[in-house]
Amino acid sequence: MTARHVLVVDDEVGIRELLYDILQDEGYHVKLAENAAQARDLRQQMRPDLVLLDIWMPDCDGISLLKEWGNGGLLTMPVVMMSGHGTIDTAVEATRIGAFDFLEKPIALQKLLKTVEAALKHAEQAPRSDMNLLSLGKSAAVSALRERLEQVAIMDVPLLLIGPKGSGADLCAHFLHRTGTPWLELDHYEKLADAPLDLLEQAREGLIYIPEVADLGKTAQKGLALLIGKAQKYAVRVVCATTRSLPSLAQQGQFDETLLQLLSGLTLQIPALAEHREDIPDLVKAMATLLAESGAAPYREFDIAALNALRNAEWPGNLSQLNGVVKNLMLTSLGEKITLEEVHRVLEQFAVTEPVVATAIPLPLDLDQPLREARDAFERLYFEHQIAKAGGNMSRVAEAVELERTHLYRKLKQLNIRTRQ
């Protein structure tokens, strides 16, 4: 098994060296920090498997650093607080805000090793998360969203999350998911249409998440309505998200009225990234750290000018687009630190250019034929254009024409359009 990495943070050199020797002898890789500033730097560059954190330090106390990591989405590893006799109550309080446990100084050898082993075992059983709701930031908009989610977490009714694409609906759904219970995210809806109760059995006592409920076909919509009606019996929480206006779709006959009523009972709006720009610098740092920890990109620090440029940029793709730009910068920048020039270089590659005014081109349609034949001819031309535009990728075609894939294939068969299998 690969040796575990432990970060020891303590301003007393004797304690640091003692813990270093003990843990090294036990086969752990150990990094040392004598204050919060060094601990911050090391945490940005790596995800330790465990942190031993002293409460009293000269530049910043351990509790404040613990909260800082939690608020920044960096508390992704167990933290064991170390405290003197006068700080036991504080150490106990730290466990309420995210610490795994605490050790009282002077630290007994067996107690140290037992606590370290227990913390690492706990970390093994916990899911290794990526971004989470805390990663979204500390702005008023995000804080209000977090408070509302905490408020509705105890409510045993389906929840509809409304917000632009890429704004973090999945993070909100994960926030409501209870650790240790099933998580079922529906990417394909065939089973929702054919066997919704099987999905409830599969997710018993857990959570079912539907990323875009507006994509459901009529049969799947009825299946979801049935699933919601039976969810309490299976102790399943149902969370749906949408980027579209469901009432408008219902008016057009594209969305089931009964299902709309079921989903309208509890809704939350997710803010677009433009509504909490002040969070972007912290988001960038958290994304950079997580990308480095996952091995997706080497860690690079962003300078202040670069962070300000990212904060002031336009993000129509919200968090998803920001994460893509951060990854691009970390992979393609040349220096150790990402600068304003590097940010401009990447953002300019995705700048929206002035649209070209197209001249009208007559459609190759016979407008003198009966309506049914003319409509079929137009639809055939339309779908052939979309398939060519997507390079034959039927997932992209389905998204572009806003049809469920099952319905799309049925339509193409009806129009006698062949697709690559």
Image (tube, rainbow, N blue to C red):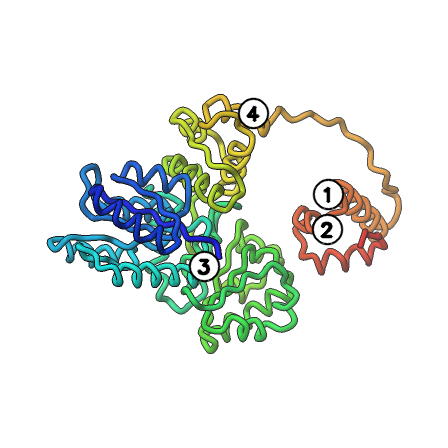
> Type of residue at label 1?
Ala
Real-space Cα distance between discs 1 and 2? 7 Å
Q: Is residue 331 left or right of residue 54?
A: right
**Tag 3 near tag 1, CB within 8 Å:** no
Q: Position of residue 105 (x, y in %)?
A: 17, 54
Depth check, front residue: 169 or 133: 133
Badge nearest the viewer, 1 or 4? 4
Name which of mark 3 and mark 2 comes first in the sequence.
Answer: 3
> Type of residue at label 4?
Glu
Name which of mark 1 and mark 4 comes first in the sequence.
Answer: 4
Circle 2 sits on which residue?
394
Real-space Cα distance between discs 3 and 2? 33 Å
* Circle 3 crowding by C-alpha within 10 Å: few under 14, some 14–19, many from 20: few
Q: Secondary structure at mark 1?
A: loop
Q: Is residue 164 visible?
A: no
Circle 1 sits on which residue?
390
Above or below residue 252? Residue 33 is: above
Depth check, front residue: 298 or 154: 298
Real-space Cα distance between discs 4 and 2? 30 Å
* Circle 2 crowding by C-alpha within 10 Å: few under 14, some 14–19, many from 20: some
* Circle 4 crowding by C-alpha within 10 Å: few under 14, some 14–19, many from 20: few
The circle drawn on residue 346 is none
Q: Position of residue 193 (x, y in %)?
A: 64, 68
Circle 4 sits on which residue?
348
Picture quarter with the C terminus: bottom right
